[in-house]
């Protein structure tokens, strides 16, 4: 693998107000870039297979959203941007190529935009959206007006992307499809590294290879901020030469250049290089979120700001969409929706729920995401889910995959030692919970698929 194969300098952008057309504009990442380019003065259009709240929001910004894919949608666009998931036989991509209109992937556009500002790229197997959302709000609250492209809605900003007037650009850096290799960050954060995406990476060594290449994208004289207590990050550090062209800054709970002492009430005393301490206060629960926030504070020197400038925004941060998103918080029932779809994410979310609601029964509704991940991590899923008092397990959400591996949610249930209900859908999960409900329950819905609907269904029925 060679980062010269991912060269954003070779990508030429048209000048605004020329039109840029997005294929698959309703997706989280693509919709964010459409917002950004609209804010930069471009005319923007796009297509998707169905309308959604996302496409409605884009239309409200003056973006022409078309339903379905057809050659005529491209028209006289100056550039076409597509997702990695789009097939080569997509009629819009075929029309663009016939008309010699440049076609680039979303990741390439993101990389090209990263050249124009001081880029902070947040990578890692877990915590990317939350940490990049924290960094965005911290810079925004400090009056620095950053541009940003995050994988989920930053609640206080009501958007997952935006074009700001300041010098900084905060980017969620995704390892899937090697997308993060298009970026050229001044500062890179790596929150953690674990085995995931078995459809792309055959083993943890392949994951480490990708992250090692990612470190080569950091600008000379830039900064790598990395978790000193994560086993995967430690393995990556052992691979790096002593004379890296960038500075390495470590963070952790007990060790690292930056570390913290948590008080248990969402407050931590952060030890800063040089001996002083600063107080870090968070609204969001969980020690994993303290680590995420610490990474942002540790990135301050590379961004040209002081740690103290970032603290008010971190204290203000209430989360990003589907990351411990509370739908209902009442004495009789709490309903939380979360994107967790890896065993480590499940463990962290359950720990955060136990921390916030220590005396209440915890019911987890979980839908595995992709057959390959479920098969590769099946025992770990069972172990993580057992930390709940009761589990409702939906069938696997295939996403980009077809069922060719002979794996099912029932195989997870067979390895678990707590009460488990097997259901087929979000509606089935809500019905199963209704049969087993107890006063004071905390229900946490987890998964990256359509199980999210169960949170709304349960919360709505409980509010009637």
Image (cartoon, grey):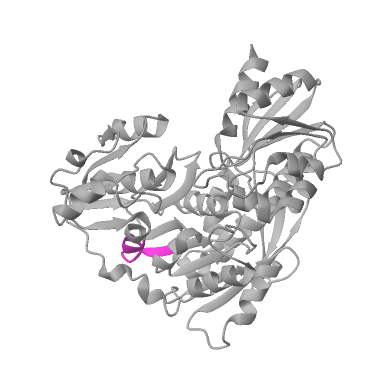
The structure residue drawn at horizontal position 56% and vertical position 86%, both measured from the top left corner, is 241
Magenta stretch contains residue 283: no
Q: Position of residue 391 (x, y in %)?
A: 76, 34
Magenta stretch contains residue 114: yes
Q: Position of residue 69 (x, y in %)?
A: 28, 38
The structure residue drawn at horizontal position 65% and vertical position 46%, both measured from the top left corner, is 406
Magenta stretch, residue numbers: 111-120
**How many labels, in total?**
0
Task: Identify which residue, 400 or 131, lies in the foreground.
Answer: 400
User: What is the quadrant of the C terminus in the image?
Assistant: top right
The quarter of the picture where residue 257 lies is bottom right
Q: Is residue 185 left or right of residue 281?
A: left
Q: Is the residue 348 above or below the residue 204 in the image?
A: above
User: What is the quadrant of the N terminus in the image?
Assistant: bottom left
* Residue 272 visible (yes or no): no
The quarter of the picture where residue 233 lies is bottom right
Q: Position of residue 424 (x, y in %)?
A: 64, 29
Task: Identify which residue, 115 or 429, lies in the foreground.
Answer: 429
* Residue 314 visible (yes or no): yes
Task: Identify which residue, 20 or 222, lies in the foreground.
Answer: 20
Task: Identify which residue, 414 or 116, lies in the foreground.
Answer: 414
The quarter of the picture where residue 307 lies is bottom right
Q: Is residue 204 left or right of residue 332?
A: left
Q: Is the residue 248 above or below the residue 158 in the image?
A: below
Q: Determine the residue located farthest toward the bottom in the rendered image.
A: 243
Q: Position of residue 285 (x, y in %)?
A: 69, 44
Q: Is residue 368 left or right of residue 331?
A: left
The structure residue drawn at horizontal position 38% and vertical position 39%, both measured from the top left corner, is 26
């Amino acid at each position: 693998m060679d980062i010269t194969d991912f060269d954003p300098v070779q990508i030429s952008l048209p000048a605004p107000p020329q039109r840029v057309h997005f294929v698959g504009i309703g997706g989280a990442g693509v919709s964010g870039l459409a917002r950004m380019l609209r804010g930069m003065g471009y005319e923007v259009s796009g297509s998707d297979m169905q309308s959604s709240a996302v496409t409605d929001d884009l239309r409200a910004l003056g973006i022409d959203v078309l339903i379905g894919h057809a050659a005529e949608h491209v028209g006289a666009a100056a550039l076409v941007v597509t997702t990695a998931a789009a097939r080569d036989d997509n009629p819009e991509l075929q029309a663009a190529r016939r008309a010699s209109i440049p076609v680039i992937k979303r990741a390439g556009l993101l990389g090209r935009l990263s050249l124009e500002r001081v880029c902070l790229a947040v990578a890692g197997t877990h915590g990317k959206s939350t940490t990049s959302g924290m960094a965005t709000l911290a810079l925004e609250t400090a009056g620095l007006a950053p541009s940003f492209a995050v994988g989920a809605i930053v609640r206080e900003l009501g958007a997952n992307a935006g074009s700001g007037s300041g010098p900084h650009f905060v980017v969620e850096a995704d390892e899937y499809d090697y997308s993060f290799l298009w970026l050229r960050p001044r500062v890179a954060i790596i929150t953690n590294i674990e085995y995931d995406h078995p459809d792309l990476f055959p083993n943890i060594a392949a994951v480490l290879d990708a992250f090692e290449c990612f470190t080569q994208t950091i600008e000379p004289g830039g900064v790598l901020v990395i978790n000193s207590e994560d086993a995967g990050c430690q393995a990556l550090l052992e691979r790096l030469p002593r004379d890296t062209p960038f500075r390495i800054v470590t963070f952790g709970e007990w060790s690292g250049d930056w570390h913290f002492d948590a008080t248990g009430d969402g407050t931590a005393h952060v030890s800063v290089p040089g001996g002083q301490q600063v107080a870090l206060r968070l609204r969001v629960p969980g020690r994993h979120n303290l680590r995420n926030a610490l990474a942002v504070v540790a990135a301050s020197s590379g961004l040209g700001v002081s740690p103290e400038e970032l603290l008010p925004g971190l204290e203000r941060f209430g989360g990003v969409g589907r990351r411990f998103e509370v739908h209902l918080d009442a004495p009789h029932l709490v309903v939380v929706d979360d994107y967790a779809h890896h065993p480590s994410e499940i463990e962290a979310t359950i720990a955060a729920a136990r921390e916030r609601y220590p005396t209440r029964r915890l019911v987890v509704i979980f839908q595995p995401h992709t057959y390959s991940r479920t098969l590769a991590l099946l025992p770990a899923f069972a172990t993580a889910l057992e930390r709940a008092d009761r589990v409702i397990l939906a069938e696997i959400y295939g996403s980009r995959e077809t069922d060719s591996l002979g794996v099912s949610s029932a195989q997870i249930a067979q390895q678990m030692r707590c009460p488990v209900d097997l259901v087929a859908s979000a509606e089935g999960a809500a019905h199963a919970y209704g049969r087993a409900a107890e006063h004071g329950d905390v229900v946490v819905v987890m998964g990256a698929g359509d199980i999210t609907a169960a949170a709304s269904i349960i919360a709505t029925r409980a509010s009637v």
